Image (tube, rainbow, N blue to C red):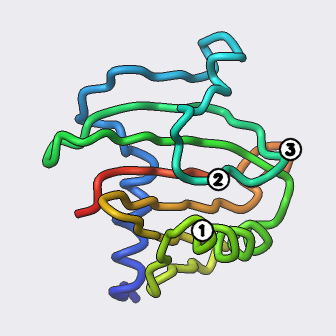
Amino acid sequence: MFTLRKGILLVLSVFALGACAGKDVSQSTNSDTPQAEAKALPADFPVPVYAGAKILSVDHSTDQYTGGPIILVAYNAINDVKVVRVWYEAELPKLGWTIRPNVIEQDNGHITMVADKGDKAVTIGLYPKFEPNGDSRYSLIVEPKK
């Protein structure tokens, strides 16, 4: 049965996986670029990356509605998504972020949470055992708050 919660999750998942589609991409790093470049976060990146994570990509684009910057960071780590969720729930408020109450958990273990700070929003996607080696995949999308 299709519920509102599953519909919202579907929309958020599609956004998380295709955040840069249809946008003007000014810089993109991926597995085809030198490793040092692929791991470089902007100096002013406002969201902490989970300790021990391996950054896979950092993509920059422009929001088609506001003209503001969008930064998508993908990384993986060996920790369970619930451990990483609890870590973000503890760390984000320390940095002034307000976590929205509508955290979405799918039956397959995928968790999506959104937090706001000033004129920015971050969508955090937690994908359990996503990688062939069993690591989980995480995404951070920082964009203008709408």
Q: Position of residue 66 (x, y in %)?
A: 16, 47
**Which numbered disc, 3 or 2, marks the residue that appears first in the sequence?**
2
**Which numbered disc, 1 or 3, marks the residue that appears first in the sequence?**
1
Front residue of this view, candidates 115 and 127:
115
Kind of residue sitting beneath label 1: Leu
Residue topped by disc 2: 48
Q: Residues within 10 Å of mark 3 (few under 14, many from 20)?
A: few
Q: Is residue 10 left or right of residue 127?
A: left
Q: CA distance from mark 3 to mark 2?
A: 24 Å
Q: Are marks 2 and 1 in contact (CB under 8 Å)?
A: yes
- The secondary element bearing badge 2 is classed as loop
Q: CA distance from mark 1 to mark 3?
A: 29 Å
**Would you place residue 64 above or below residue 16 in this image?**
above
Front residue of this view, candidates 69 and 54:
69
Q: CA distance from mark 2 to mark 1?
A: 8 Å
Residue topped by disc 3: 133
User: Residue at position x 40%, y 84% from top?
Assistant: 5
Instruction: Mark 1 vs mark 3: give the one in front.
Output: 1
Front residue of this view, candidates 67 and 7:
67
Quarter where residue 111 is shown: bottom right
Q: Is residue 47 left or right of residue 6?
A: right
Kind of residue sitting beneath label 2: Pro
Residue topped by disc 1: 92
User: Residue at position x 55%, y 60% from top?
Assistant: 125
Could you say which disc has been placed on residue 144 in the image? Answer: none
Kind of residue sitting beneath label 3: Asn
- The secondary element bearing badge 3 is classed as loop
User: Residue at position x 46%, y 87% from top?
Assistant: 101
